[in-house]
Image (cartoon, rainbow, N blue to C red):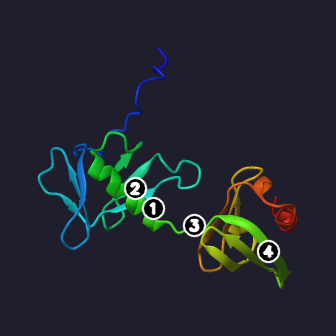
């Protein structure tokens, strides 16, 4: 029988021998502490990351220990208490610096490196893209540009840009 559309999504079971998330909080040192049901000792200094930050940013949240071993994979945040949910959202928001491109002012290629000057939601910036591997096309109108320093710039919809900006980026789509 197919699942009921009105049912809330259910998180996958925790790793063997572990319980469900009781809480996620900060300790006095500013470290993130994870408490699991059925486990007396908390996990201290855990890391929180999106598994699919661009395609499914609100689902599949991974909580790992400081060595990178996944402790819990959350389908979404709906089953958590509000303080835990807000801490995870704040951590994810603060972790990802991804300016959104609003307008392209210039685009120039020299020696295999493309220099793009753009107006973003964080201000004007010039960044360099070394190869096509640094551009991730997510759809016919959406892309992520990763610059030489590892910063990602999101282009939400090329069709929403002005004609001059679209012309600067046409070679990438």
- How crowded pointer 3 is (Cα within 10 Å; few <14, some 14-19, many 20+) is rated as some
Quarter occupied by residue 124: bottom right
Front label number (3 vs 4): 4
Circle 3/circle 1 CB separation < 8 Å = no
Relative image position of residue 162 (x, y in whole percent): 82, 61
Mark 2 lies on residue = 89
Q: CA distance from mark 2 to mark 4?
A: 33 Å
**Alpha carbons under labels 3 and 2: distance apart:** 15 Å
Measured Cα–Cα span from mark 2 to mark 1: 6 Å
The residue under label 4 is: 105
Residue at image coords 15%, 49%:
39
Asked which secondary structure carries label 1, the reply is helix
Which is more N-terminal, label 4 or label 2?
2
* Mark 4 vs 1, N-terminal side: 1
Cβ atoms at labels 4 and 1 below 8 Å apart: no
Give left or right: position of 78 versus 148: left
């Amino acid at each position: 029988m197919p699942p009921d559309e009105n049912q809330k999504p259910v998180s996958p079971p925790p790793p063997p021998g572990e319980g469900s998330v009781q809480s996620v909080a900060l300790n006095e040192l500013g470290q993130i502490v994870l408490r699991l049901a059925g486990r007396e000792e908390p996990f201290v200094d855990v890391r929180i990351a999106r598994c699919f930050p661009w395609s499914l940013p609100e689902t599949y949240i991974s909580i790992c220990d400081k060595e990178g071993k996944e402790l819990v994979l959350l389908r979404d945040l709906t089953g958590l208490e509000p303080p835990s949910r807000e801490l995870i959202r704040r951590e994810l928001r603060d972790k990802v610096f991804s300016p959104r491109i609003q307008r392209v002012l210039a685009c120039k290629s020299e020696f295999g490196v493309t220099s793009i000057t753009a107006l973003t939601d964080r201000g004007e910036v010039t960044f360099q893209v070394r190869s096509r591997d640094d551009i991730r096309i997510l759809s016919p109108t959406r892309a992520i540009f990763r610059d030489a320093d590892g910063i990602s710039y999101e282009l939400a919809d090329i069709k929403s840009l002005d004609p001059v900006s679209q012309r600067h980026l046409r070679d990438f789509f």
